[in-house]
Image (tube, rainbow, N blue to C red):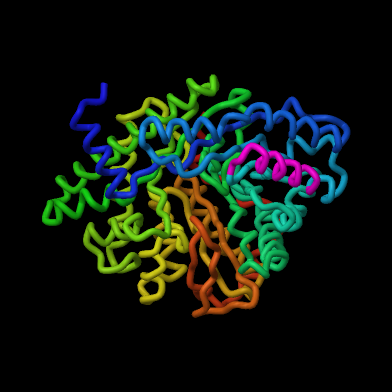
Amino acid sequence: MINLLEVNETNQMISQENLDVRTITMGISLLDCIDASTEAVCEKVYQKIRTKAARLVATGQEIEAEFGIPVVNKRISVTPVSLIGGPCCRTTSDFVKIAKTLDQAAKEVGVNFIGGYSALVTKGMTPAERLLIESIPEALAATERVCASVNVGSTKSGINMDAVRLMGTVIHQTAEKTKEADSIGCAKLVVFCNAPDDNPFMAGAFHGVTQEDTVIHVGVSGPGVVRHALHVNQDADFESLCETIKKTAFKITRVGQLVAKEASRRLNVPFGIVDLSLAPTPAVGDSVAEILEEIGVEYAGAPGTTAALALLNDQVKKGGIMASSYVGGLSGAFIPLSEDHAMTEAALAGALNLEKLEAMTCVCSVGLDMIAVPGDTKESTISGIIADEMAIGMINQKTTAVRLIPVIGKTVGDTARFGGLLGEAPVIAVNPFSCEKLIARKGTIPAPVHSFKN
């Protein structure tokens, strides 16, 4: 039971400290939509999404009104489309038809994003998977709400360097096709290592093939709540600091658990997981970087930042797993450059560069997220950055990701503006030296020795 004190604390967290449920995400399996005809697939996909998600947005709004808990986004994730389109798609245009269908269905049910325009190619690519990947630039340029992801590596399988090389090209082409809006298409495209199949957060969400036909996931947030708790305990030692973060994460996750169970009950859809990630927004007071500053660094990126982030990430998980029996997804702390105003300020101050961000990804929730780089960055350099991040995930047995945005027409010192939750980011420098010979090599980087656990 939640007692009166917890109710009052939750009310304060909502009204003064930016606590919200960042997303209710409905995962929908499209495996039963497979057909030999692209037109038939599109019709089945459209009808299933409209049927299953018809009351998703309304249910989120009802929970908001009844419990007073903001539910910022209502979203959908679907089975990786490379699997759905495999039997029928013969060209990239065929896959783009499915993307447009997803977009239309998402608009009609009222969700802000739909994820799952995805391919899982950790060891190799089928012809259909390659076609889907090659179609991503056109698909993201032709749609508003579709998000794409490609998993190119895992601890068990190694890193598919052919896919890594291809993704450098795809990201650059996506940037070109959406250059009129600061290459915003790349903000809807994630490259993963060890992608979880129960992730409610965009742009990397997809519905895993091992899951039920339909499921409800919830992603909570609340960096402002954690920052406030640390601010009133400024002189605490590390033990007290950790206890404060754990207790706060517990309270935040309790709110997510409540919303998840209510949404599951009202929609008559099984409950999946609560993802307890601290996901920032561009709003002042809703920043992960501000938490790191409360812990004791002048700016995110200063010496000690990686240690502070490791502490934060670990304590968030320790507190959250006591509040829900089904914690999953990414769970930890996001460090997106454009979506966190204090991260942006740190980059502008010179405290934060791409190399420091890469170091921080060793201990954060995901990886290099929403980072704007010069539009003339070479495709091989983009692939090299992806390869480095995938190696961190593979060796450390964790999820890592890259959401890199080469902003066409802009260079270091310019600002890329995406709007809404995506915020804005300074264009930061990349290492000018070449990795073309490395990226030109074909094949797979083998899985590490500690992957053999049978």
Return the x and y of residue 252 as percentages of the image width and height: 32, 38
Judge whether 18 appears above or below 255 on screen: below
Return the x and y of residue 60 as percentages of the image width and height: 49, 34
Residue drawn where x is 11% and y is 56% of the image = 235
Mark yes or no: residue 120 visible: no
Return the x and y of residue 51 as percentages of the image width and height: 68, 27
Which one is in front, 28 or 268?
268
Asked if the magenta segment contains residue 102, the reply would be: yes
Left or right, 132 with respect to 39, comes to left
Residue drawn where x is 49% and y is 24% of the image = 264
Residue drawn where x is 20% and y is 28% of the image = 4
Where the N terminus falls, by quadrant? top left
Judge whether 345 appears above or below 75 on screen: below
Left or right, 454 with respect to 351, comes to right
Which one is in front, 87 or 346?
346
Judge whether 344 appears above or below 433 on screen: above
Query: Most prominent secondary structure in the magenta stretch?
Result: helix
Over which residues does the magenta segment extend? 96-111
Quarter residue 387 falls in:
bottom right
